[in-house]
């Protein structure tokens, strides 16, 4: 199936999708502020995590359900090959980044969009648990 938008219109639409200061990033920012741990948002480091707790060597990623392939194998997939391939590449890249960071001594926490929005307590418990583990 061909795209219903012109390349220019599709480019404009895609340019509106933010990579930083998303709703889930801002919600995680509030969670971390509430916990009182020192953290940095959008640190310049391998893998571009959303947050880092430098002292504890913990990185946090806030992954959008669609773009990062939540439950991808059991969900209805996009019809266009381009989007299927994009999501699969994102999932592969996420796994590679996680492996490398862990190999380099970082603890990696990845939170799904729906968990940040609806299961905040579970996210808080995972963060506290990881900090106490250190």
Image (cartoon, rainbow, N blue to C red):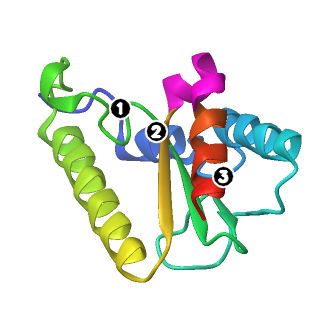
Residue 47 sits above or below residue 83 on the image: below
Badge 3 element: loop
Q: Are marks 2 and 3 in contact (CB under 8 Å)?
A: no
Of marks 2 and 3, the one in the foreground:
3
In the rendered image, which residue does mark 3 sit on? 20
Q: Position of residue 33 (x, y in %)?
A: 86, 46
Instruction: Please report the bounds of the magenta region as a residue range.
Output: 113-122
Who is closer to the viewer here, 48 or 40?
A: 40
118 lies left or right of 8: right
Answer whether residue 71 is magenta in the image: no
38 lies left or right of 1: right
Who is closer to the viewer here, 66 or 50?
A: 50
Answer whether residue 117 is magenta in the image: yes
Q: Where, quadrant-wise, is the N terminus in this rendering?
A: top left
Badge 2 element: helix
Q: Position of residue 111 (x, y in %)?
A: 50, 40
Using a 10 Å C-alpha cutoff, classify the residue at mark 1 as few (fewer than 14 neighbours), some (14 to 19) or many (20 or more).
Answer: few
Residue 41 sits above or below residue 81 on the image: below
Q: Position of residue 70 (x, y in %)?
A: 32, 32
Quote the CA–CA distance across marks 2 and 3.
Answer: 22 Å
In the rendered image, which residue does mark 2 sit on? 9
Residue at the extreme front: 133
Image point (36%, 42%), residue name: 68
Using a 10 Å C-alpha cutoff, classify the residue at mark 3 as few (fewer than 14 neighbours), some (14 to 19) or many (20 or more).
Answer: few
Q: Are marks 2 and 1 in contact (CB under 8 Å)?
A: yes
Quarter residue 23 falls in: top right
Quote the CA–CA distance across marks 3 and 1.
Answer: 25 Å
Image point (21%, 31%), residue name: 72
73 lies left or right of 39: left
In the rendered image, which residue does mark 1 sit on? 5
Total of numbered circles in the picture? 3
Q: Earlier in the sequence, mark 2 or mark 3?
A: 2
């Amino acid at each position: 199936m061909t795209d219903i938008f012109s390349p220019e219109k599709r480019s404009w639409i895609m340019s509106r999708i933010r990579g930083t200061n998303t709703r889930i990033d801002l919600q995680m920012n509030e969670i971390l502020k509430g916990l009182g741990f020192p953290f940095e948002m959008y640190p310049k480091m391998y893998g571009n995590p959303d947050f880092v707790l430098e002292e504890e060597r913990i990185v946090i990623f806030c992954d959008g359900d669609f773009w990062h392939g939540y439950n991808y194998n059991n969900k209805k997939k996009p019809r266009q090959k381009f989007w299927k391939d994009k999501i699969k590449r994102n999932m592969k890249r996420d796994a590679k980044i996680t492996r490398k960071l862990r190999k380099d001594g970082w603890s990696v926490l990845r939170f799904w969009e729906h968990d940040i929005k609806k299961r905040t307590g579970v996210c808080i418990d995972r963060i506290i648990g990881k900090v106490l583990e250190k």
